[in-house]
Image: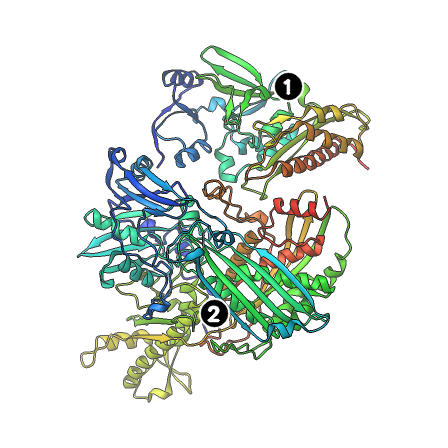
Amino acid sequence: MSVGKSVTRVDAVDKVTGMAKYTADIFPPGTLSAKIVRSTIAHGRVLSIDTSEAEKVPGVVKIVTCFDVPKNYFPTAGHPWSTDPAHQDVADRLMLTDRVRFYGDDVAAVIATDDIAAARAARLCKVEYEEYPFVLDQVEAMQEGAPQLHEAYPNNILAHTSDSWGDWEEAVSEPGLLCLDKWYDTPVVQHCHIENHVCCAYMEGGRVTVISSTQIPHIVRRIVGQALGWPWGKVRIIKPYIGGGFGNKQDALYEPLCAYLTTVVGGRPVKIDMSREETFTCSRVRHAIRYRLVTYFRRDGTFVARSMEEYSKQGAYASHGHSIAAKATSGFAQLYKCKAYKFDAYTVFTNTPVAGAMRAYGMPQVTFAMESHIEDIAVMLGMDPIQLRKKNLMDVGFVDDFAGTVNHYDSHGQCIQKGSGYIGWEEKRRKYRNQTGPVRRGVGMSVFWYNTGVWPISLEVSACRMVLNQDGSIQLMIGETEIGQGADTVFAQMAAETVGIPVEKVHVASTQDTDTTPFGLGAYASRQTYVGGMAIKQTGEMLKSKILRHASKLSGLPENMLDIKEGKIVHKETGQALMNLGELATHVLYSLEESEHIAAESTYQCKSNAYSFGCSFAEVEVDIPMCRVKVLNIVNVHDCGTLINPKLAEAQVHGGMSMALGYALGEQLLFDEKTGRPLNNNFLDYKIPTAIDHPDLGADFVENPEPTSPFGTKALGEPPAVPGAPAIRNAILHATGVAIDNIPMTPHILFERFKEEGLI
Amino acid sequence: MFDFEVLYEARSVSNAIELLCQHPKAKIIAGGSDLLIKIREGKETGLELVSIFTLDELRGVSIKEDGTLCILPLTSFSNVIKSPVIQENFGVLAQALSQAGGPQIRNIATIGGNICNGVTSADSASTLLAWDARLELTGPSGVRLLHIEDFYLGAGKVDLKPAEILTAILIKKESYSGYFGHFIKYSMRRAMDIATIGCSVNVKLSEDKKAISDARIAFGVTGPVPRRAPTAEAAARGKAVSLETVEEFAAAAQADINPRTSWRATREFRTHIAKEMAKWALIESIKLAGGELQ
């Protein structure tokens, strides 16, 4: 058995010894450096660009401006293409633009022989602008008279969706109901993967190759084709190891421009290597979303009617657009029961960095709002927050009519039980009840809702190829990508399990090359173990059956009497080893009668989805006069189905919890109100928690096997980042009695709130 | 790759001064932990640099015959922290420097560079001010001594004359003998951060530990340059060791500071936190000095 074991990562040794190759390790010799000239205004139009001084800089090869690039508008979101135009992403980007919509927009690119020459020349490009008024806040952007970003979207509204069920008026007219009507707000944050986005493009045989730090090579290939106006077959994307993505690299970032730049310098290799400052504001960010939540509830805590207004800050271009706000509405609608429900969700353009996919896609935002709101209701009722949740949470057996997803187990109940035990909930809720000193402690919790893949919103498909080597090992090729999460390792485990060989006999081709790698959508949602697992299982079984067919011929035994175990052909009943796989493969390939290169390739289209549930419990200490929060203890408990690799699962949870700590307490991108300029797009001023800001992170699991998954798994990639912030917020509320409704809960916010509440 | 034109490697202090005289536009580079960041950000480009980094004659920590503490300016933060002399008598300085950057920065950054940058948030600044440090500056016309408080002229501006180099940081025996101090860095994170406010306090108690013979306090980031808080010092000097004195000291400290509102923090927030820091830094200093507070 290979599945369920904490086998060592297949890339562990290469990564810790520096052997693993990342994009910057494989720039071809003579690679030119491109530097982007960025707008120094938040909104306006480029009237002219004077490059005369820049061109004099020694080393400059070529300068391309917004007036030179082809006007092929293209979408950037890393979604599968839809053949239905109504479901295609908004095509609103150009490789360089004269109509600038945020501070840092791309107006020109300098290509030079080295980084310094490129940077010097970029600074010397003189850009003349016509300036327009700009708007940074999404709700202000919707108002009449606000500056307009895109002609096709009046009032800057990219999308507005609404829905309801039940009879709202009837439901809220029930006598004796209580109501809570409150606003919650979340910030613009960034993924902060260690490796900035970097790509390098060159030409060969009239085609363009882009080596890129991306999560989605096959999708980027299509987008580069669209941007260049080239047939997609003339584009090749190579994805080596990448230093994290968290959704930022689930977008075409600078691959289209880089591909274009090589075409203007005769196919010489050109790289775009973003700085951290650029990555913060000129790649993608998480949508800041503001919520108004209204709940009508009975005195016994039963929810009767729930509504949500959602205002999502898109930034300057559509990217993933309304998908994020829309996902948040599903979670909000399904997690808690009620008689009547309604929502209005808006995604609104603003003159700020473009928001795209970021780990958990709308759920950290809505979960902060919703789980804070529920805690506030518990306070109003004087009820235990767990009891209130249990009374209202989605029933076991619930079926999502749209997706067909089923809530098979009491995952929330089981996860809450483990989490509350870990943190000492009952005892600490009592112990911390009536504190008076300057330093107080509290415990809080949050649950979450998550979906594994994207079916039926869009296509779910994965293709896989396995090739048997003459030593009995296999090569595994799949379009799903390793982005640091350990995907290659669990793929190897699943392949080993299916074929019947030891894990070390599976060689995962980690690099995706769209010329040779089977099609896959890549690392996004929390889909790869689930959907990729389906493709691996199907392909592995095909390979196994081919092997057994040959084994039958060689052994004279019927196929149904044979199996593969630990890399050997065995007799099913006696368990006797008949031959090892290497002998079989060598014999078959070099057979003078019937030679075969034993390989299997198949596509699996997944038409299901799976709920992934869990919770977070946090204990905090609040120093009221110093306006500081220290997280003393925090645990996440997940039911992500059967664990393929428990150690990797634990690491995945730790990473997500760390992001949640930053989201709760420190991280936010700030902009100058007067100019729209980013203020803190660097690691000094953007406060990611350091190692010593972390308590020990607890990760625990409930393993209810997911019936729709061949290996019993469901989402774990993103959910760990979801419940931490509201759990910490609710713990602060427990400690101090002060409800904080916007994150991050920095000392500045605590200072204001503690003053308002008379604590300091 | 860093964008600078030329780097002259000084072979001695006098050679460094010569090089600076020959290249009046040149900037001095020591550990580079600040200057290289400015170059990387494009704030400085095409510079001429005079490197003093290899001048080992400017490294080390010692006590002179007259008891004066002498820290040579190229001593790295790590080496100041590790120095037995510092550990024994100036624990508060080690405490302050330990909170600067991460291990790599503390290994390369020099204490002299931290001072000569002239930034109010420098982690060494409030402590050196609170200990009454003096600076030895060597230039073409010789050596002069300056009180550290007078060295800071304005944000990012220090009293370094053309071709002048900081050659020693000195603390007289009477400034430290019998004094005990505590430093608090208030920042948004517990490591790898810039100070929202830095506060360093030291006290000397009477023999019976019942009264405060002397108290000194300095803040960073409560103004454009690090500053002592004389009203607070006067409020504690000669007073009984008591929580009441502590409160008076902290309240008085607010009169000495003039923080500004920036996107990093409001004036109101900084003022509130500065008062709390003054209080806790004094309490801890009194405890270190053997005083008891009810």
Residue at the top extreme of this rendering:
B141
- From this viewpoint, is residue B241 visible? yes
Q: Identify residue for label 1.
A: B172
* Residue A495, picture quadrant: bottom left
Near-viewer residue (A224 or A99) = A99
Chain letter behind tag 1 = B
Q: Identify residue for label 2.
A: A452
Near-viewer residue (A609 or A692) = A609
Chain letter behind tag 2 = A
Q: Nearer the viewer, mark 1 or mark 2?
A: 2
Residue at (49% x, 58% y) in the render:
A312
Compared to residue B164, the image places residue B6 above or below, namely below
Q: Is residue B37 left or right of residue A392?
A: left
Residue at (46% x, 17% y) in the render:
B164
Q: Considering the numbered disc 1 on the image, is that residue within a helix, a strand or a loop? A: loop
Near-viewer residue (A207 or A99) = A99
Compared to residue A50, the image places residue A420 above or below, namely below
* Tags 1 and 2 both on a single chain: no
- Marks 1 and 2, how far apart at CA: 67 Å
- From this viewpoint, is residue A476 visible? no
Q: Percent from the top left, x then y, of residue A27?
A: 29, 49
Q: Considering the numbered disc 2 on the image, is that residue within a helix, a strand or a loop? A: loop
* Residue A357, picture quadrant: bottom left
The C terminus of chain A: image quadrant:
top right
Give the residue type that dot 1 points to.
Lys
Q: Percent from the top left, x then y, of residue A575?
A: 42, 83
- Label 2: how many residues lie within 10 Å, few (<14), some (14-19) or many (20+)? many
Residue at the front extreme of this rendering:
A145
